[in-house]
Amino acid sequence: MKSGGQTVLRPAPIDAARPLAADAMAGLTAKPKRLAPKYFYDAAGATLFDQITRLPEYYPTRSELALLRANAPALASLFPPGCALVEFGGGSSRKARILLGAAATVEAYVPIDISREFLQQDAAQLRRDLPRLAVHPIVGDFTQLPNLPEAVAATPRVGFFPGSTIGNLEPHEACEFLRRAAAMLGPGSLFAIGVDLVKAPDILYRAYNDAEGVTAKFNLNVLARLNRELGADFDLAAFEHHAFYNAERSRIEMHLASTRRQKVRLCGATIEFRAGETIHTENSYKYSIESFQALAQGGGWSPLTVFSDGLFSVHVLRFAQG
Ligand code: AVJ
């Protein structure tokens, strides 16, 4: 901002210890430039993602909800009596409620999410709707795998990781996550995981390039967030949403491409962009049923059953040994 030739400082909190500032700085000074997909989800990003889940082109949410509804009794019949349902980074209990409604045997629900406010609201509503259920929300990043609450220390566990969020991890990270989830959930536990499937590239392409441009807004919102929270000066009109299927690596890639040569200020530094240079903002890995089962086995889990409609899959895994 300029005023009478003087640079007016914005009230930009500059704190390298803050994960967003430190990560944004590291990612935007790296080659190639990148930003982690977890930063999409501020309040505006969560609203945009919610709109994505209702787009005609974005099949994953509809497919997964239908699979959960159709197979909830079969899934629930596998749950150990008196178990705790532990949900990783779900964003809302909407999908867990389908399982909770079919499995009267679930005693406790432990949602793990990064948003405290959201978790508390959701937990309060769930306690009203299902008074017999003990709800123990944990504030945390699902990849950090926080300790489970004392109250479920002696309870058999069922993990639940819907939404194909596991697709944001590199396959070796997903394997490591599954290994650590096994250690956290313990021997004999089950794990239900939603995983998007490899399919015709045009279907995948459309799911991330919707006609309304909601996914483009969602992608660009990460730059708006850096402007809002870090006082950066990204010109959103000078970046374009790029999403494409990388068949060699079985993943959708999302990028933000600079439409021209430009400089952006961020946390006291100047970030330079060449015309066409991109920021890599997301990978969304797609698996076949077999390739995900092989990954799960590498992480210590045995495939028990899988539900699929050809577009999306819900895997049920068991952790046999300690
Ligand atoms: C929440 C990671 C499963 O990869 O489909 C949707 C995020 N990005 N549209 C996905 C997303 C663009 C979504 N996941």
Image (spheres, grey):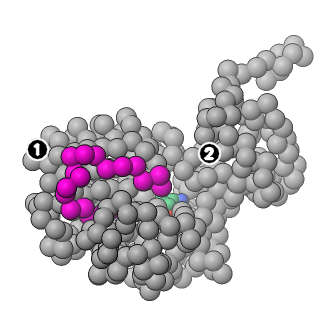
Callout 1, which amino acid?
Pro
Which corner quadrant holds the N terminus?
Answer: top right
Alpha-carbon span between mark 2 and mark 1? 38 Å
Q: How many marks?
A: 2
Identify the residue position indicated by label 2 in the image: 222
Q: Which residue is mark 1?
A: 131
- Disc 2 crowd rating (10 Å Cα; few below 14, some 14-19, many 20+) is many
Left or right for 229, reference 274: left
Q: Nearer the viewer, mark 2 or mark 1?
A: 1
Q: Residue at x 60, y 64 (%)?
A: 283
Residue 190 appears in which quarter of the rendering? bottom left
Residue at 63% x, 77% y is 249
Left or right, 82 with reference to 306: left
Compared across the picture, whether 225 is left or right of 44 comes to right
| Disc 1, SS | loop
Residue at 37 percent of width and 63 percent of height: 183
Instruction: Compare marks 2 and 1 and give the one earlier in the sequence.
Output: 1
Q: Is residue 304 above or below residue 67?
A: below
Give the extent of the magenta segment: 143-160
**x%, y% of residue 169?**
54, 64
Q: Residues within 10 Å of mark 1 (few under 14, many from 20)?
A: few
